Amino acid sequence: IAESKEMRLKHLEEQAMYALKISCENFDNAVFPNAMIAGDVVITHLLSRLGYLKDGKCTVMCVDTFHLFPETMAFLAEMEDFYGFKAEVFCAEGVPVGDKAAYDKKYGADLWKEDIEQYDKVCKVEPFQRGLKTLNTNCMINGRTRWQGFERAWIDLFENAPIGGGLAKCNPLAYWTLEDCFDYIAKYQIPHHPLHAEGYPSIGDAKDTIPIPEDGSVTFKNFEFQGDKAQWLDYACERKGRFVGLTKKDGSAKTECGIHVEGAERTFDRDLWEAGEGSAVQALGAVSDVEAFVSAGKPAVVAVYAPWCQFCQAMEDEYENLAKELNIPVAKFRGDEEREFVQANLNTESFPTVNVVTPDGKVVKYDSEERTVEAFKAFVESTVGAKV
């Protein structure tokens, strides 16, 4: 049995390294988003064996959700030292890496409780996509396997990713089981996440990840299992302790964070009120455009927004209809990219902020959260003192 397992692992290693060679030798900007779970530490070691971490042919990328276990980012630093690479870390837009207080101030510490899907967009999907774009990724390497569950049961070594509009995706461990991953970790005695020793088969956010079983009786310590390892290694059990207690808006249980699902790129790749879709809302692309708009000497409306903001998304139709009904200019300005300017000049502390511009250049904030055409029109008319 031991000999046959070694033969299997040898084949899987060769197959995975073949896939990684294809990715790193044939694409200029191969990127490996590393979540530091069992499969990902295997890929990290394979990339190191091939020399791709030190020669720069593969960049390691990480997403810090600000809700990870403290051990996770500490383990990343350990891997960086061990293998001699530096990961590119991305987090929620507009927040400095590692600054949880800034995240809480901007998005709210309880965003995940209030709207888990919006949390996934802000903390996982958007920074993930931004990372791929920032690094000019044309091939994404990831650790998904068929063994992880039915959502992934038909993946192959290579596929086109839904993210980024079709970049190549390499799944070097597509045909591995979780047992294969731990066999590899033990064979080469490579660094692995410390929480495996605490009973966690897979590690995600601390808020919704639990040991399996919950009493922590199954562990992986000193490169071997303690307890009934089948509770980790059976089909689709690796992620059994992930997304615990989380449900989607339709009431179904969450099994994915949204990064790898079909259509994920549409969440952030599209803007709001796009001219190409026939929007009547005028786009103000630069600070100078806003200044000219405000000083034009005529009444107008401008919404300061961020495309990722759920409240901006929710008012998209009403604001579009407002633009079509009013006889004065109705505009938009993306405020998350010019925070200091919109705070100082457009009354903006959060998104969306709708302002009415008076003929004498005053910018008057609409303070109500009732974002309907009727409410907007009533405020515009009371502010400019005339029917519009």
Image (cartoon, rainbow, N blue to C red):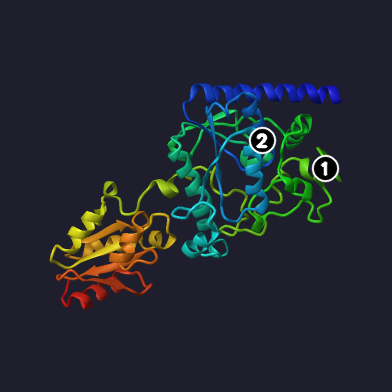
Residue behind mark 2: 82
**Quarter of the image containing the C terminus?**
bottom left
Give residue 229's mark: 1
From the top left corner, tell me how far across and down residue 9 is, in percent: 75, 25
- Horizontally, is 373 left or right of 186 in the view? left
Is residue 201 visible to the viewer in this orientation of the structure? no
Callout 2: SS = helix
Give the Cα separation between the discs numbered 2 and 1.
28 Å
Say which amino acid is labelled 2. Phe
- As displayed, is residue 113 above or below residue 149? below
- Name the N-terminal-most of marks 2 and 1: 2
Observer-nearest residue: 259 or 199?
199
Q: Verify CB contact (< 8 Å) between mark 2 and mark 1.
A: no
From the top left corner, tell me how far across and down residue 303 is, in percent: 30, 62
- As displayed, is residue 249 above or below residue 129? below
- The residue sitting at 73% across, 48% down in the picture is 195
- The residue sitting at 50% across, 22% down in the picture is 26
- The residue sitting at 42% across, 59% down in the picture is 309
Q: How crowded is mark 2: few (under 14 residues within 10 Å), some or many (20 or more)?
A: few
